[in-house]
Image (tube, grey):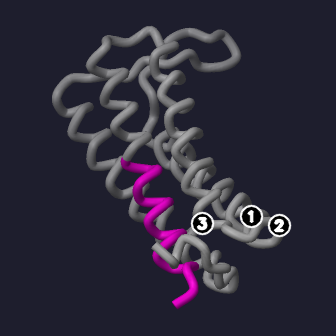
Amino acid sequence: MNWLNQPLDVRRLPLATLIGALIGVIANLIVYFAARAAGFEFLAPAPPTNEPMPLPAVAVIVSTVIPAIGAAVVVALLNRFTARPLRVFLIIAAVVLIISFAGPFTLPISLIEQMILNVMHIIAAGAIIWALVRFTAAK
């Protein structure tokens, strides 16, 4: 596991971020549309009235792309300020993923819908983490 202790090639960070976000978005949209076809609505409060409305597909896209960008920023900062950026990033990513599971449990939806949303969190995290590690780890 020496690669965990290596500095990163941050020049590849934009491409890695794009790849991770794209894989995550495509995989999550497949899950989203399959669940919608099965009859799940994923109701969420919509501003400004907070009236529960079905979660739109664009929310799935935004909820995957924003974390990818955030993860890339974290990787860049860790590479600059720590000796073991990948090791620290993987720890931070795991903690953030676990914390993210709380979000779906606050929605007024069934347990199965909450679990599907949490699976989508795992999919996004997996795609983003894989791409950032795969494409920025020094060879």
Disc 3: CA contacts within 10 A as few (<14), some (14-19) or many (>=20): many
Instruction: Answer whether residue 14 is magenta in the image.
Output: no
Dot 3 amino acid type = Leu
Cα distance, mark 2 to mark 1? 5 Å
Q: Mark 2 or mark 3: which comes first in sequence?
A: 2
Reading the image, the residue beneath label 2 is 81
Cα distance, mark 2 to mark 3? 12 Å
- Magenta span dominant secondary structure: helix
Residue under the image location 44 percent in, 50 percent down: 124
* Image vertical order of residue 86 relative to residue 138, above or below: above
Quadrant assignment, res 126:
bottom left
Residue toward you, 125 or 4: 4
Instruction: Say the numbered circle drawn on residue 78.
Output: 1
Q: x, y percentage for residue 123?
A: 37, 48
Whether residue 118 sits left or right of residue 139 in the image: it is: left
Q: x, y percentage for residue 14?
A: 64, 76
Disc 1: CA contacts within 10 A as few (<14), some (14-19) or many (>=20): some
Quadrant assignment, res 109:
top left
**What is the secondary structure assignment of the residue under circle 1?**
helix
Instruction: Say the numbered circle drawn on residue 86.
Output: 3
Whether residue 75 sits left or right of residue 82 in the image: it is: left
* Image vertical order of residue 73 relative to residue 44, above or below: below
**What is the secondary structure assignment of the residue under circle 2?**
helix
Q: What stretch is highlighted in magenta?
A: 123-139
